[in-house]
Image: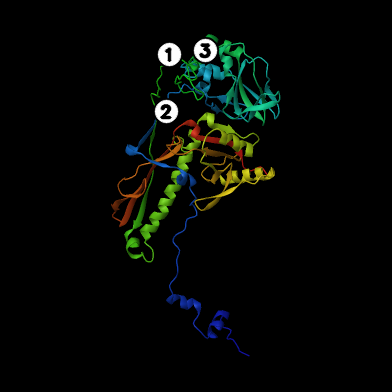
């Protein structure tokens, strides 16, 4: 039996009994195999990978379009909460009948006369056949416009939600009747302006302006609101052919390249002495560029000036019928454009869609996109992006887009050939060494994104991602 000295620890006793070199000591003579620095914040960045990129000289891209007469199809904005919701007076110009109304005092007077009303699920806001003598602004919630189908059954004509409106035709003062019924799908808060109240403000001015707007709509135009091109077809003999020309927008939109920048700093001692087996400056730069590209994609989706979520045409924004994204909702989204190349959604929204198709006993196809297996619907890939936000109410959006200049779609913009270019549209410029021996590099990305025609981009809004 071995007697252990009480003054020795168990570890020392074990050490005394070893018969070979221990692993802890052996590691001092061994080299290690190292990974390059890893970064959890790197995402697939499908938007940057799938968009065709257009070289944008001079940092400006002008989108020329045919002249359009489309007006007043926007959404209004509200202030306040709870029982005291008000419409922003200037936002009333988003109503077609009040577009370009210059009298701010009149807009203030009209805004102050809106009445707040609340409806529960299934309540009827207006009924077909009744006099249409009120303007409705949807401040919160969702409603269905219901009309008679071709065979006499009821059908949902449209879904309206926050910021939408209906009934502004009554501002022209005509004796109209509702052609549809509006029913609440969720609890709804609306602001209502009765025509009788308008008569007490400046009925003649409002009526005259609304009629002038209506006359402006009577200009020859196609279904997209573009100035018509007169063409004769199906004629015989030698009739006089129409004379025509194609008119352009006088003030087309110009996209300026946005910029994302940071200054990378590396101490000269680190750059000189700690470069084996990996170059420290190169690894620092690699991770900085990854973070910059992540921010670039975020801005291309969420920036109020250029972001796709903010710049989709209002006629191309639709709402889910019941909350979660169903096959019917995605069918309607796809039906509004030709050659949809892909859809982009938050991963939780894709999971919500997967639950809905499974509930119906459907199994979407899965295809390979650049080595990744992704779900499709009607053959269109549904690509994930965590840059699409989820609101505090648990709703998100799904984007569908046609891409490329040849198809009048969505294109990414950048300028190549810039000084000290590291990647297309991204430069790394040495800016000097300061008195503390720290090297600085200016890392810059120039980018933007443009929608060439309105129907190139569509958004399915108010997508519930948490319903099980």
| Residue 177 percent across, percent down from the top left | 64, 15
Does 229 sit above or below residue 449? above
Q: Earlier in the sequence, mark 3 or mark 2?
A: 2
Quadrant in the rendering for residue 166: top right
Spatial separation of the CA atoms under disc 3 and disc 2? 27 Å
| Residue 220 percent across, percent down from the top left | 47, 17
The answer to whether residue 415 is visible is yes
| Mark carried by residue 65 | 2
Q: Earlier in the sequence, mark 3 or mark 1?
A: 3
Q: Nearer the viewer, residue 264 or 100?
A: 100
Say if mark 3 contacts mark 2, CB within 8 Å: no
Q: Nearer the viewer, residue 55 or 135?
A: 55
Instruction: Indicate the quadrant containing the C terminus: top left, top right, bottom left or bottom right.
Output: top right
Is label 2 in a helix, a strand or a loop?
loop
Is label 1 in a helix, a strand or a loop?
loop
The answer to whether residue 326 is visible is no
> Residue under circle 3?
211
> Residue under circle 1?
240
Say if mark 3 contacts mark 1, CB within 8 Å: no
Spatial separation of the CA atoms under disc 3 and disc 1? 34 Å
């Amino acid at each position: 039996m071995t007697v252990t000295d009480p003054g020795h620890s168990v570890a020392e006793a074990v050490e005394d009994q070893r018969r070979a070199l221990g692993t802890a000591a052996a590691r001092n003579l061994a080299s290690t195999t190292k990974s390059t620095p890893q970064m959890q914040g790197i995402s697939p960045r499908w938007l940057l990978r799938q968009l065709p990129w257009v070289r944008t000289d001079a940092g400006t891209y002008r989108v020329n379009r045919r002249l359009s007469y489309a007006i007043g199809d926007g959404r209004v904005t509200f202030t306040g909460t709870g029982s005291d919701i008000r419409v922003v007076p200037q936002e009333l110009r988003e109503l077609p009948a009040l577009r370009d109304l210059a009298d701010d005092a009149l807009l203030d007077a009209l805004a102050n006369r809106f009445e707040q009303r609340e409806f529960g699920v299934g309540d009827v806001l207006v009924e077909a056949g009744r006099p249409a003598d009120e303007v409705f602004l949807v401040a919160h919630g969702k409603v269905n416009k219901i009309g008679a189908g071709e065979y006499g059954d009821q059908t949902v004509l449209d879904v309206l939600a926050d910021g939408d409106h209906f009934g502004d035709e009554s501002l022209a003062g005509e004796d109209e009747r509702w052609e549809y019924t509006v029913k609440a799908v969720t609890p709804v808060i609306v602001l209502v302006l009765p025509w009788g109240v308008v008569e007490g403000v400046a009925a003649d001015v409002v009526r005259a302006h609304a009629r002038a707007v209506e006359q402006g709509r009577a200009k020859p135009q196609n279904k997209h609101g573009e100035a018509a091109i007169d063409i004769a077809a199906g004629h015989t003999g030698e009739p006089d052919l129409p004379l025509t020309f194609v008119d352009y927008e006088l003030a087309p939109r110009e996209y300026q390249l946005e910029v994302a920048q940071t200054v990378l700093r590396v101490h000269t001692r680190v750059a000189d002495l700690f470069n084996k087996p990996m170059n420290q400056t190169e690894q620092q730069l690699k991770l900085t560029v990854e973070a910059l590209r992540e921010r670039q994609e975020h801005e291309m989706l969420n920036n109020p000036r250029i972001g796709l979520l903010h710049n989709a045409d209002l006629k191309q924004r639709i709402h889910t019928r019941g909350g979660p994204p169903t096959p019917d909702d995605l069918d309607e989204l796809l039906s509004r454009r030709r050659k949809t190349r892909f859809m982009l959604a938050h991963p939780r929204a894709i999971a919500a869609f997967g639950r809905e198709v499974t509930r119906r006993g459907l199994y979407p196809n899965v295809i390979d996109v650049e080595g990744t297996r992704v779900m499709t619907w009607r053959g269109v890939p549904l690509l994930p992006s965590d840059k699409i936000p989820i609101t505090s109410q648990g709703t998100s959006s799904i984007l569908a887009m046609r891409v490329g200049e040849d198809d009048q779609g969505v294109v990414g913009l950048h300028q190549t050939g810039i000084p000290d270019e590291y990647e297309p549209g991204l430069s790394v410029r040495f800016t000097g060494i300061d008195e503390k021996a720290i090297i600085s590099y200016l890392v810059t990305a120039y980018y933007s994104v443009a929608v060439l025609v309105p129907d190139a981009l569509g958004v399915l809004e108010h997508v519930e991602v948490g319903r099980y």
